Image (cartoon, helix red, strand yellow):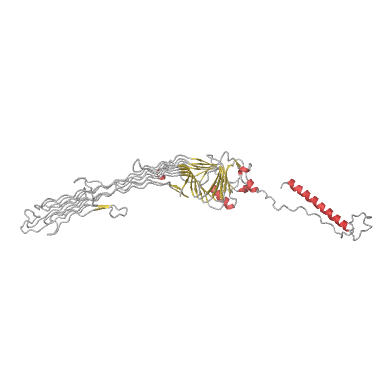
Amino acid sequence: MNRHAKRTMQLTAHSASALVMASLVAAVHAASCVYDTPSPNCEDRHENCLPAGTGGQTPDPPDPDPPDPDPPDPPDPEEETCVPREKPDGVDDACGVFVSARGGSSDGAGTKEKPLGSLQQAIDLAKEKGTARVYACAGRGDGEDFNEAVEVPGGVAIYGGLDCNDGWKWVGDAKKTSLTAGKGVIPLRMRGLPGTVHIEDLHVVAQSTEQQDAEGAGLSSIAAIAHSTSVELVRCVLEAGHAEAGGDGAAHAGLAAQGARGEVGGNACSAAPEVDVRGGRMVTNECSTSGDADDGSWGGKGGNGSVNSGDRGDDGRPILTSINGAENGGVGNNGLHYCAPGRPGNALDDKTPGRAASGSPGADAMGIGEISLDGYAGFSGDDGGRGAPGQGGGGGGGERGVSTATENRYCPGDRSEDRERRAGAAGGSGGAGGCGGSGGRGGLPGGSSIALISLDAALSFEDVTLKAGNGGDGGQGGPGQPGGPGGQGGTGGRVPDGAAGLLPACDGGTGGTGGTGGKGGGGQGGHSLGIAFRGAPPPTDGATIELGKAGTGGQGSDASHSGAPGMAINTLEFN
């Protein structure tokens, strides 16, 4: 109420009081000349007398005007004076906490004269004091940039766009308060209830990540996240930079494990009479990195040497179903033919080892990725399948030895007709096959450029700009690891000096080469998004959205296979 109105009401009340007093005086005066019968002296006294028979009563004075039952609410001076745009000369210290990146300090009082230097510190103090308002200096590139990641709880308001060199006056139309953070860091998070997060004249910039090194492959650039809260943005800019491309699947170092060398067969005449000479033992290359006990290779055992004939060498494993290499153990000498060496694993011919089957290619990345409090995560391509292990070489065939029924075959120092029966030389075992190569690693996803992520939040915009940069390309699938070479076969047993008529046993075959791992799948391309959301679709009224380019999916096993491309779209819903 203004002073003029108050003065008018005071005058009116004074006049009414005077009127009431005059009426009371008149009533008392009249009462002095009221009688049951007319007094002859009443008029003589020049009194204002009532006629006879009225009972001497006078009417009550009228009531003053009743008060208004619904007076209007007085205006709230705090709401009118604590919004900088509505007070050209600047708001008062009592309105909240003041902060300046250039002129403030960590031990400041949070006033205009002694502001704080950290925006997060100001937010925390404002909530603690109960004012829940923060007033931040405007500036960009002049030392007034706030370089920190902040979290704003529900119920807190931030007013930017203030000229701290001129009484903290509002200049938001010309200059905003600037907030940024390090590469790959989200500058602004808004979360929590009760209350609304209200922000005016703030320019949030998420740095571009496209120039990061290989260790940061696929980093996204995200300006802000709102989680389970109500948000009002007024004259703000949320700007995300260009996102980084996903890295290619890294190549494996070297080859897969080589197969073990086969063992040497026993020499002729080395065993006791009537006892076989043992062939080279089976050797193993255990490649079961995936827990599969059969994911390995074994060289075939060499054939034993015996008195009358040599044994056949065992086949190398895994046993193949193809004709080549299915049975690769060498035959022993049975008197009709000499022993034969073991054939190589995965044999292309009797002397050349082959290569086992390659692994299957990895699946290319599909889908759109995921959003969370941590930001955005795209999908990588799957790793390729492991190559098959090479088949072990076949064991070499064994040889026959010495008996009384044979002529011209003697062990050293024993040429009598009743000479002891001794076994011949034994075959060497086959070399183990090489392990299959590991599958190529999947390409990494490209990062996404997102102005705002909304996780079950209620959003309101007034003159807001949402800017997204380019999404990163997905990485290519990596090459499969080459399989390991097979081990050499063990040599067959030899004939000792001084023996006669005996032959050396046959060598084991070389193990096959492991198969090459399958190529990795291509990574998903990154997005360029104004709002990525989960929950109710956000309104876009009051917002201008500017987009960049979406990233392409990385190539997978060949040019016709690639990861899912990214999208450039104003809003995109995630599960």
Q: Which residue lies furthest to the front in this view?
A: 53
Q: Position of residue 428 (x, y in %)?
A: 18, 52
Estimate the x, y position of residue 424 in percent, counting from the top left: 13, 54
Is residue 356 shown left or right of residue 103?
left
| Picture coordinates of residue 339, whole percent (x, y) | 14, 51
Q: In which quarter of the image is residue 565?
A: top left
The answer to whether residue 321 of the structure is visible from this angle is: yes
Q: Nearer the viewer, residue 423 or 535?
A: 535
Q: Camera-side residue: 116 or 95?
A: 95
Furthest toward the left, the residue is: 417
On screen, residue 149 versus residue 50, left or right, reads left
How many marks the image carries: the answer is: 0
Q: Can residue 118 be seen in this view?
A: no
- Taking the spot 59% from the left edge, 52% from the top edge, the residue there is 129
Q: Which residue is drawn at 84% across and 57% down?
A: 58
**Residue 65 versus residue 89: which sits nearer the camera?**
65
Considering depth in this image, is 168 or 292 the residue closer to the camera? 292
Is residue 357 rendered to the left or right of residue 152? Answer: left
- Give left or right: position of 184 versus 100: left
Tell me residue 9's x, y (percent): 76, 49
